[in-house]
Image: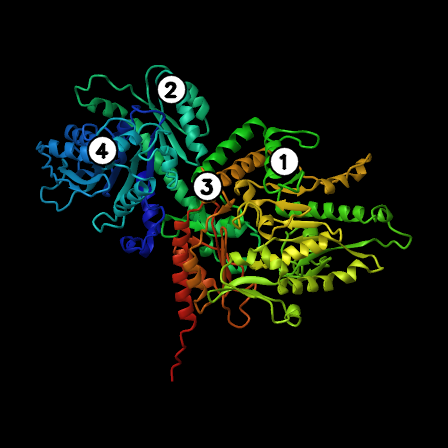
Amino acid sequence: MSLVSAVFAASLRRRGPLFYSMRHRSLHSGIEYPLTHPIYTIWASNTSLGKTLVSAGLSMSFLSSSSISRKRFVYLKPVQTGFPEDSDSRFVYRKFCDYVSHKPLPFSVFASNSVLKASASAANAVLRMRCPVRNEGFGNEIVREAGNSGNGLVNVNCYEERKLQGSESSEIELSPQSELVCKTMYGWQEAVSPHLAAEREEALVEDSVLLDMLKKCLVSGSVGTSSDMKDSEVIYVIETAGGVASPGPSGSLQCDLYRPFRLPAILVGDGRLGGISGTISAYESLKLRGYDVAAVIFEDHGLMNEVPLLSYFRKRVPVLLLPSIPKDFSDDLISWFEKSHTVFTHLKEIMLSSFLEKTQRLHEMPKKACDIFWWPFTQHNLVPEEKVTVIDSRCAENFSVHKSCDWIAQQFDACASWWTQGPDANLQTELARDMGYTAARYGHVMFPENVHEPSLELAELLVEGVGKGWASRVYFSDNGSTAIEIAIKMAFRMFLSHNDMLFDHVNADANGSHLDLKVLALRGSYHGDTLGAMEAQAPSPFTGFLQQPWYRGRGIFLDPPTVSMYDGIWKVSLPEEMQSQKSGQEQLSFKSRNEIFESGRDDSSLASLYASSILHNLVPFLYAKGLSRIGALIVEPVVQGAGGMQMIDPLYQRILVRECKSRSIPVIFDEVFTGFWRLGSESAAEMIQCQPDIACFAKLMTGGIIPLAVTLASEAVFQVFSGDSKLKALLHGHSYTAHPMGCAAAVKAIKWYKDSNTNMNLISESRLLQELWDPELMLQISLLPAVRRVLALGTLCAIEILEEGSNAGYASMYVSSLLKKLHEDGLYMRPLGNVIYLMCGPCTSPDTCRHLLEKVHARIHEFGQLKNKPVICAA
């Protein structure tokens, strides 16, 4: 069996019953395409290097290969300038027809060329040309006229076709054996860069519109969508315009424009003088953006460029050399195509082999993952192979996932990959570029007593940003949990020093007893999985005996009041202890969320209730004669993440911080989750209007592209570690402390988030993000009978589903059927028990958030109806 047949036999075996009903699928609005046949993008390191010749040569090699099955070669040209005089799709169509005329195939082929949309001037030129009819024994060409579609573009619908009779074909056969389909998606008349042509001819095409049209072209003609071609061998080729980094119609570089598809690439290199550098640069530009390059092919100009290129690309990618193209086209290049046939056949085999390897790997990944991985926070017995999500790549907020019916489809990463993700597509590319530069410049370098530019620039940004007004020192580590460990060490030393207890307890007393330092923390908090961080949180599923037999909970854990929207009203929920102490004068309901953050509440009766409750819990440890002391307060400001996305009343946290500071108890803010615009402000400390002594940041700081954490501290904290002995220093560190790549990524991300030129959501004058989650939709969701509470703040939207009986809590599987439906809608979500949440990035558009909310609203409504549907028992 040939490689061609093997590829398509394998794809047919995998299609299953769903495959043949693809034309009836409900398609998501995001990028998706079939993986039942190869789809490749043809790139070039510069313009005029022969991309279209390569496309034409591939069409000839593929359609003329010996095989009993029907074949379809689809050529797409999304962007064409100089149109219609210069039409690459028509070139491929014509050259193929000329080739078959010169060297007839044993079977017939149906060839067509069409144009979908063009600028008005290009469309008029098409009509003037009238696509003249040619009749050379191959059938007639059919022309349809243009019609204006508005928006500066015209629906051209110019179409020509031929039936190329095979030498061994029956004259009475009902349908051709194989098919060549050539399409130009968008055309402009002026032969200049697409962004200039689009502007000058007033026919602009946004990136999203172009990509949507490309998706339609890839989906509408796919195998299985046409009953007469469902058993065909098919290959798609998409040819770009100009070079890898040439602008598209909107001005976006084409390597960025087509990145959401991340289709495998064929790079047409440059065999001319200077072509070695250009070819390598183009290749690295594609790799930097995450493209897979299957082969490099270029014309032989007699300069031996293949020698250094073969050396550079060794073990990376095959390099193919085409014969020199004759300057005399007297034979219509037929001789050149014949001489190049072996090269194009080799290229075709590389493309098919690469496609087969990729699809086999994608199909094998779920089973291999189940056999070898030990996933965190996962009960493997509850994850059958079919539930494993195979992620092929990500672009901005979206995963590209492999579906079992052989599709690559997008899912919105609605948990922001454990709350780390913030980049849009542009920032993702910028981060990759800066990290690549930094890796090449530094690799990793030792940090103690040293300095490098990325670490210094990041430290300065942090002190002037999230630490502005209180922090003077930056301590680097590698993840949020270790940042918390460092913070606790700092806080305890500060507490002992400021309370004149440090040297009294350097050594154990005569009885072997030590001072028992405790933390003051809130129930429902979560500060990480390292042993010390777990001791600083109240008992929970994460600290139970099955997880941490050493756990003692070395803290005083307060029950905090929480805030959410219930039935359209923002309400404060008091813990049981405060319920019995309230006077009845406390304001517990609010018309808007913003009222909850107002500092005017500090003089309210509710503030007095909070202060009384806090002191009641503090006093026993402030004046006790024993060895137990509260050495630090640690809180997640405003919102507790892993504890169920609970918003703590900011008034309560503000009073708690003030009471602790007035008693020389150091304050730690755990902003690993809440920092860097996650809740709408650069730091959640701004939202509760008080400052810590120590704060921890990670996750969103680097845009989630690489692990890095920091612990910020005030100068007062730093000074208690100063002295003449190294033993008095903070003896803590990690091998990858201040990793240059992490620091460079953080510098880029922080600057990007807080620049209104790159983050369109930023309201510069208020240093806040605009409202991302539509308030009216949030109100409607809160009124659904299946919903207990909702919370929308910054990039976070959390919804607690009203549970039945014992279905609440972290271990709940109550919403599994709801999550399945949302996955089908293109939302990747990982709930916290019966709490589902959406999380976007600081740069995500409100329109995207609204679109997500509409899907969630519809599915929760449907979920509630199913849960409340009466069960009818048979008599």
List the residue tagged with mark 4.
Answer: 89
> Which circle, 1 or 2, is nearer the viewer?
1
Amino acid at circle 3:
Asn
Spatial CA span between label 3 and label 1: 26 Å
Q: Position of residue 669 (x, y in %)?
A: 64, 50
Residue 600 quadrant: bottom right
Residue 316 found in image quarter: top left
The mark that comes first in sequence, 3 or 1, is 1
Observer-nearest residue: 114 or 506? 506
- The residue that disc 1 covers is 738
Closer to the eye: label 4 or 1: 1
Residue 464: in sight, yes or no?
A: yes
Contact (CB < 8 A) between labels 4 and 1? no
State the CA–CA distance, disc 4 to disc 1.
52 Å
What is the three-letter code of the residue carrying label 4? Ser
Asked if disc 1 and disc 2 are in contact, CB closer than 8 Å, the reply is no
Residue that label 2 marks: 275
2 and 3 marks in contact (CB < 8 Å): no
Residue at the disc numbered 3: 759
The residue under label 2 is which amino acid type? Gly
| 413 w.r.t. 325: above or below | below
In the rendered structure, the answer to whether residue 779 lies left or right of residue 620 reads left
Residue ID at (46%, 56%): 387
Mark toward the start of the polypeptide (3 vs 4): 4
Sequence-earlier tag: 4 or 1: 4
Q: Is residue 537 visible?
A: no
| 234 or 683, nearer to the observer | 683
CB-based contact (under 8 Å), mark 2 and mark 4: no
| Sequence-earlier tag: 1 or 2 | 2
